[in-house]
Amino acid sequence: MSILETVDVQSGERSVAAEFDYLIEAPNWTRDGKYLIYNSLGHLYKFDLSTCESAMIESGFANQCNNDHVLSPDNSQVAVSHHTYEDGQSRIYIFALQGGSPVLVTPMAPSYLHGWSPDGTTLAYCAERDEEYDIYTISVHGGIETQLTHTAGLNDGPEYSPDGKHIWFNSVRTGLMQVWRMNADGSEQIQMTHDENNSWFPHISPDGDKVAYITYRKGDVAPGDHPPNKEVEIRIMPSAGGEFRTLVKLFGGQGTINVNSWSPDSGKLAFVSYRIKE
């Protein structure tokens, strides 16, 4: 059972938008505040918050999409990670948010999308190259990719700040999975969380003030793993750094907030919690 929810960032009040008896994951909030985009069974869907109805987005051959989907800054397009038939590996494609034919961006695989620069020109993603997972950027038109991290172990979840100056990400380089921040060119990589847990997928609020991320308890998972069906927390911290606060405790993990799910006014987050069928 998948429960699509929103939470007020100030009050912590949760609201259920819809329940599904199958797997849905990773809601993006559209910038007009009217819709949530989520993935399910390889496709993307557009959920109308006023009618609570879902409609599938036409994506041509890209029908094996995972929970790494990101909207373009103007919301005219969506980029996805689609597992291609040739080798089953994840590659990044772009198509129109209203539906359309996918265009390949990253020929090399596996590539897992996470961020789209505010100026609309660049994608940020995690990729395995030479048996190491690092963070890369590439033009939305494809071409040569640029490697930004060069440390052993998993570097994942890169997402641009709204001003385009920073990329937030998560890395196991200090032992546990922690939230990090670097300049958009890869310089000045700074650890932003320092607690005894494993934290993933930092998402910056549209006003640039806050960062939301998901945290697993230290003993529940390996530092480089983010499985489903665990007791997890969604936490909020200032984007300048500092103490976090727990916003939501829930049963979830993989699929809960893999992508940026802030409301356009920075007042709410959308997420998915789960319940095991009896």
Image: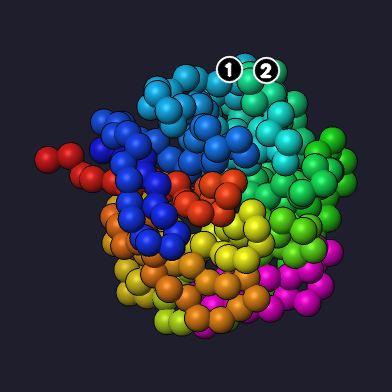
Q: x, y (%) of residue 64?
A: 53, 29
Q: x, y (%) of residue 130?
A: 71, 58
Q: Quadrant of residue 10?
A: bottom left
Q: Are marks 1 and 2 in contact (CB under 8 Å)?
A: yes
Residue 190 included in the magenta stretch of the image = yes
Which residue reaches farthest right? 143
The local crowd at label 2, few if under 14, some if 14 to 19, many if 20 or more residues have their Cα within 10 Å, is some
Which residue reaches farthest left? 278
| The C terminus lies in quadrant | top left
- What's the residue at 21%, 44% (across, down)? 276
Tell me if residue 53 comes above or below residue 235 in the rendering: above
* Mark 2, residue position: 100
Q: Earlier in the sequence, mark 1 or mark 2?
A: 1
Label 1 to label 2, Cα distance in Å?
A: 6 Å
- What's the residue at 36%, 44% (across, down)? 5
What stretch of residues is rendered in magenta?
Answer: 176-194
- What's the residue at 54%, 59% (across, down)? 201
- What's the residue at 61%, 78% (across, down)? 241
* Mark 1, residue position: 58
Q: Secondary structure at mark 2?
A: loop
| The N terminus lies in quadrant | top left
The local crowd at label 1, few if under 14, some if 14 to 19, many if 20 or more residues have their Cα within 10 Å, is some
Q: Quadrant of residue 149?
A: bottom right
Q: Quadrant of residue 253?
A: bottom left
Q: Amino acid at mark 1?
A: Glu
Tell me if residue 52 comes above or below residue 149 in the rendering: above
Q: Amino acid at mark 2?
A: Gly
